[in-house]
Image: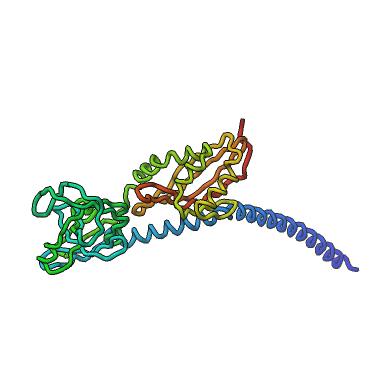
Amino acid sequence: MSNAAKDARLWMAQSFSSNAKRYERVRHRGRAALQGRVRFLKSIRALAPVVLLASTLSTSIALSQQSSSNEEIPIGRCDVLPVVQVKVAGQDMRFLLDTGATTILNLKAFSAGASKRIHVDSWQGSAATSAREVSLPEFQLGTHQLHDLKLPAIDLSPIGKACGGAIDGILGVDLLDRMGVTIDLQRKVAVLDLAPADSKARFDEMETAMHHCNVAFNQAKAGELEDCFDPEIVLYTQHGEFRGRKQVMQYLNEQYFKDAKDLHFEMSPHDIRSFGDALWYSYDYSMDKGSEHRAGHGVAMCRRREGKWVILNMHNALLEPASMAKP
């Protein structure tokens, strides 16, 4: 074999060896990177539903903000009187607009409550009259909803007869201000301000009203805590999905309340959004149970039901494995 051939073989062997070592190093780095990626995916898998929910809500909020902060509701006429269509407990009704009066219902259109003497500011002046108090579970103008209203009801049939149409009530300045409505008679629209409410103030109100719920959990008072949940509550945890008060309380009793020594839950809210009488918020939380410490992230939704705040939905995800608490 010539020297040139020997040199060529030697070069090929050295080159192959060098490439093999380089390939092995690349393969090792690739395997390490892949394993790191797998660990990363596993670590965020538990939070995927949280991220999806937060992204969906954020997208919905962004789209609504991009579209318009106002909603225009057409104003109709009953002869010369301005009227709007509303929904009361799911039923379509027609209310007279009057910024010089407080809201009054037509006694003929509603089931009356207990009779009592009240002071009514009428659109023709003030008069003391015998009226009925009517409780309404829901009142809706456009997309804005009010819940759990108690309003006076008197016989407004003379107004309907005068204008030649049915009048189910007078929508007055009290509810118009509460819903942020501006009347534009020239354009014949009622402008409903949909700008975001003071979510932080609403959250503070909710947190104050539900402080006893956090105390009930930390003290393992199951009976008191159960009343803090909506009957249709949905709870998502690393252990599964639990629907309704019965399943949720069974899970909490088995997971936390059997041995509730030194049980303590604490959370720090972040993003807060209000939707009518509902609140959505994200938070970081920490939980100690005896010597065990857990930390995680969550999202929750609460709503005011029959004048009382309740938890409608909660999703907690661990950000780190349970560990022993520091002494």
Q: Vertical placement of 250 versus 6: above or below?
A: above
Foreground: 225 or 153?
153
Quarter of the image containing the C terminus? top right
Q: How many marks?
A: 0
Residue 55: percent from left, percent from top: 46, 57
* Whether residue 225 is visible: yes
Foreground: 69 or 245?
245
In the rendered view, does 32 fall on the left or right side of 85?
Answer: right
**Image quadrant where residue 33 sits:** bottom right
Residue 175: percent from left, percent from top: 23, 53
In the rendered view, does 140 fall on the left or right side of 13?
Answer: left
From this viewpoint, which residue is outermost toward the right?
1
Residue 36: percent from left, percent from top: 65, 53
- The residue at the point 52 percent across, 47 percent down is 297
From this viewpoint, which residue is outermost toward the top?
327
- The residue at the point 39 percent across, 39 percent down is 208
Q: How is the image coloured?
A: rainbow
* Whether residue 177 is visible: no
**Image quadrant where residue 137 sits:** bottom left
Quarter of the image containing the N terminus? bottom right
From this viewpoint, which residue is outermost toward the front?
115
Residue 98: percent from left, percent from top: 15, 57
